[in-house]
Image (cartoon, rainbow, N blue to C red):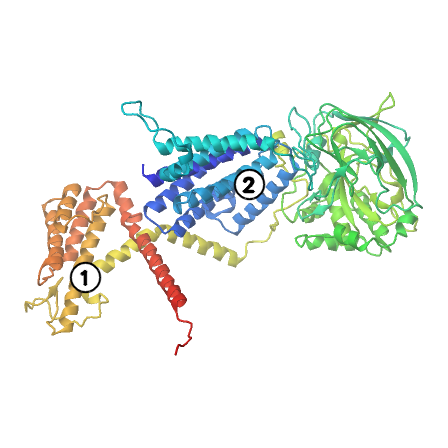
Amino acid sequence: MSGRARMAVCAAAATLMASCALLPLVDPATWFLQAAVLLVIQTAVGAAARRVPLARPLTVAAQSVVTLLLLTLVFAREQAPAGLIPGPEAFGRFADLLQQGTDDVSRYAIPAPLSDGIRLLLIGGVLLIGLAVDALAVTFRNAAPAGLPLLALYSVAAGLSDGAADWLWFLIAAVGYLTMLLAESRERLSQWGRVFGGTPRTPGGEPGAVAPVRTGRRIGAVALGAALVVPLALPAMNGGLLDGAGTGVGAGTGGGGTISAVNPLVSLRDSLNVDEDRQVLSLRTETSNLSNLYLRIVSLDDFDGTTWKPSRRDIVGVPDEFPTPQGLGPDVRRAEVRTRIAASDGYAQDWLPMPYPPSRVDIEGNWRYEPLGMTLVGDHGQNTRGVQYTVTSLDVQPTARQLADAPAPPPALRREFTEVPDSLPSVVSRTAREVTDGAANPYEQAVRLQEYFALNGGFEYDTEVDVGSGSQGIARFLRDKQGFCVHFSFAMASMARTLGIPARVAVGFAPGTPQADGTVSVGLRDAHAWPELYFEGVGWTRFEPTPNRGTTPTYTVPEIPGSSLPELPEQSRPTAEAPSAEPSASSSCSAQQKRLQECGAALPVDLGGTDDEGRPWWQTAAWVALGVAAVALLLLPMLWRLRRRSVRLASPLHAPSGAARVPTPRGRDRGEGRTDGIEVEALPGEAERRAAEVAAGHTLAVWRELTDTAWDYGILPDDALTPRRAAARIVRLGQLDEAAAGAVHRVAGSVEQVLFAPRAQAATGLAAEVRTVRTALRSRAGRRTRMRAVLAPRSARRALWDVTDRWTAVRARWAGRWAALLRRPSGQQTG
């Protein structure tokens, strides 16, 4: 194995060793095997390109193209022609998967399930780092900077993990990097390590490692020891967004069959579809009205057009007394309620479920407070598993009149919480305007939106509905009118924002079930999501658009004439016969798919395609053109080889030599410069010299064609041999008969005449001799060799050499021009 090949193997191994740090983040770890296989292919392509050899930029480009094709084959083959060639649909699939992976990373605790989005992030990241390492260490022959992408890969993994085995992954990555350095330059390592150099080996003693190897070992030992030991002696650093976070805010374990998701929205659908409802919280409260006792976990206020998620905000220590909720005025009636809550041992959530708005929380453990959402989040791996706490909250009781008379919200709040992305379909805002047409104020608009979803819009509650994924999700939900609480809350909050009403989505639990002992049991099927709209003077206010779920707030029965909102039951809980408890008839989603959220995203989303419209003609034409281009690309070596053979074997009369020729009829023999059956008039002076050059050039081109033909059939050219010895080698390896052997030697003799004779006499019929040799080689070759000689000829490698040579020449020419410009005098004249 050559030195560069060993270097490529070491670079790939170093990338895989650094990638081991990602193993604890996802379960199962089958992605690692896929990444290893694809990385091996990527490395092999780089080795082949360097062996050609290609120019360095072309080598990196070839690896990049092959990497894109591999990712298309693995992740977007259904959207790509032939399952391999990426197009607009394939790139759209990549964008959707990357968005899904980014959302999953922010939602799931470690270890996260291996969804398609996370798998693309992992495998694509490893291939990208592998490409950078291979390019730096092997293609550009500078292994030291290749440690930067390896460090980036390790740092990402270390930043997401819980830190329990970070030293082990660092050790593995460092060993891979040092091995790559040692493979690149033993001499450099020996120069680095003179301080650590040992005594020379004594004559006759046991042979030990050579100096560079011993030095590399010592450098590795010292560097790793310093990296592992020195940080222990450094003072800890605090501060920043997650001040004192240690292992990270919300670092759940995810084990033991518990509900452990960084964003509780992910577990909500699975909770609603469990076969057996399981108690997760038990509470005892002072209030007698349980209909308003929603346990809020977190608010989702960042809407990107695909999903809602929590914004990243500053967190602080838990205060003894919480401030008055934002926007709540003194005229609104309120009552203080104390609630004692106990979480089961099987419920591990990073956010703390509490009645909203809380004014005081008594709890033990490592918890942090987010002021804007008035939520508590676990720190240093703290979660709700088995905790007991007491919450003092406010039961805010606004009237419909107070909400209707609410003044405009502050401009900054309105700007932040009414923002909608450009990707939101226009049907959302159009439907919102149609539903609220004639409403006198934002409150009436909000009530009409609630009525539209809960009463008169024809919507059905179904936790098993599959509405696809993509930017058209809300539009699909508004059309199909089937979904569960997430769909209803997302749609109403989005529509409210288009009307200029500040809105967000809350996730938590609907009121639980009273027990005989006076407690209230909250189970998995009580998981719920609802919209919160902001009204100045009242603050963030709950609405309930989901039919057959939760309770309808009393303040949404407006004190204005003409309201169509009837009196609803105070509480409506799902039962075993409700759509949420039994799978629909059309459902074919397995439990594993539900866990990975493959049956339908939490947000009703769609791929954005049309249902009944045909594909436009221009799109079909574009795909046909792309297919033709792909076929042409595959046939390019064959086409180039056919063209090159035609040019080489053509009559010298058609060669672009610029020499003047006067052809004479075949058969006339004037004894002057006859070439390949075409006699050339003896011309005086310069014309005669040019004609001789044309004949010589044609002879050499025919010889090149003969050697390339032999190469196509497996006989590698050897330019170090004389034409006579090269001809003998072709005859021997090709096992040619007497006629073909004579043709080879005649061409070789003509080449020797051109190269060495004082007055060259070009032979005739050379093109026919080459065709004779080609026929003989073809007759003795197997079917596979014959097919390869036509479809993928080995000698087509010369085309790549030509491109590399031209690139080098262009670069040298431009470098010379720039050097000339830099050396140009300034124009100053001297006396």
Circle 1 sits in a helix, a strand or a loop, which is it?
helix
Q: Amino acid at mark 1?
A: Gly
Marks 2 and 1, Cα distance to the nearest angstrom? 56 Å
The extreme top residue here reads 517
In the picture, the disc for residue 603 is none
In the picture, measured across the screen, residue 290 lies left or right of residue 810, that is right
In terms of image quadrants, where is residue 270?
top right
Residue to which mark 2 is pinned: 121
- x and y, in percent, of residue 743 in the image: 12, 51
Q: Which quadrant of the view contains residue 736?
A: top left
Q: Residue at x 45, y 38 (%)?
A: 38
- 772 or 297: nearer the viewer: 297
Q: Is residue 249 left or right of residue 730?
A: right
Q: Earlier in the sequence, mark 2 or mark 1?
A: 2
Please tell me whether residue 523 is drawn above or below residue 819 in the rendered image. Answer: above
User: What residue occupies the far front of the structure in this picture?
Assistant: 831
| Amino acid at pointer 2 | Leu
In this rendering, is residue 794 above or below 294? below
Residue under circle 1? 697
